[in-house]
Image (tube, helix red, strand yellow):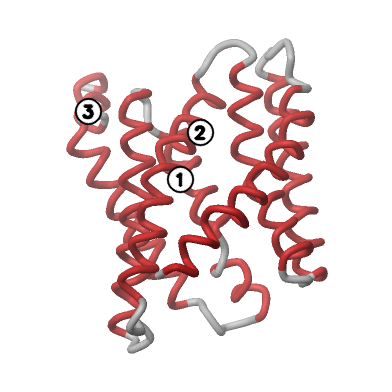
Amino acid sequence: MTPLTASRRDTPVTVLTATAAFGLLLGWATYALHGTTPLLEQATNSVSTWIIWTAAAGALIRPRSLAVWGGALMMLATCCGYYAASALGGTFGSGGLGIAAVWSLAGLIGGPLLGWAGWTVRRGRGDVRAVAAAVITMVVLGEGLGLGLGLHYWGEAVVFLAVGALLTALLTVYLVRAGVHRYWLCAVLAPVGGLVFYLAEKGILDGLLESV
């Protein structure tokens, strides 16, 4: 009975339906929590929030291919949940469709990568697990750089950088305990990836958002 139950839970329809439902809920929640407290305002108005949950979903899904597809679906569903809530809340402006399209495209590109990263950190083998861990933490560090260097919100930037550093440390410890030989790659690649993420967000994503 146990293997049968587990296999039913791992079917593509079940996994992807649950992932999409959670993505819709996450998108709605991040919109609903805007303006509640300064901390929640910044935490919910953050790329890192969606990406970390997408990586967590990838870690929970057993088949690797489903983790990748689930990452894409979750990011797309999160965008849909957020902008549907925005439309119902009366804050979906005239340029809303273009902005939603840009973020959905970004999610379809980044979602599979983050789904793979979450799966690899938990279930992969070899040093690639350390690289995958750096992929997850670089987003938080990159957003911290964007808040500081780009927007000059240094108070919020320090918080994001501290959280990114803590997450990097925790994942590095996890890799050590998992027996990954080059566990230190996570700590080395995370800040480099954070800088790359910041530059890509500033040079590509911001340009697309400004064009719509």
Mark 2 and mark 3: Cα distance apart in space: 24 Å
Residue picked out by circle 2: 118
On the picture, is 209 further left or further right than 97? right
> What is the quadrant of residue 69 in the picture?
top left
User: What residue lies at 72% left-to-right and 70% top-to-bottom?
Assistant: 151
Mark 3–mark 1 distance (CA, rounded to whole Å): 24 Å
Give the quadrant of residue 115: top left
* Tag of residue 54: 1
Q: What residue type is labelled 3?
A: Thr
Q: How crowded is mark 1: few (under 14 residues within 10 Å), some or many (20 or more)?
A: many
Q: Front-most of 152 and 78?
A: 152
SS for callout 2: helix
Location of residue 76 with respect to 12 vertically, above or below: below
Question: Mark 2 belongs to which amino acid?
Answer: Gly
Residue drawn at 78 percent across, 71 percent down: 152
- Mark 1 residue type: Thr
Element on which disc 1 rests: helix
User: Measured from the top left, where is residue 15 in percent x and y?
Assistant: 27, 38
- 197 left or right of 62 in image: right
Q: Give the alpha-carbon distance from disc 1 to disc 2, as whole Å.
A: 8 Å
Residue at the extreme front:
211
The earlier-in-sequence mark between 1 and 2 is 1
Other residues around mark 3 within 10 Å, as few (<14) / some (14–19) / many (≥20): few
Find out whether the residues at labels 1 and 2 contact each other: C-beta distance under 8 Å.
yes
Relative image position of residue 17 (x, y in whole percent): 22, 46
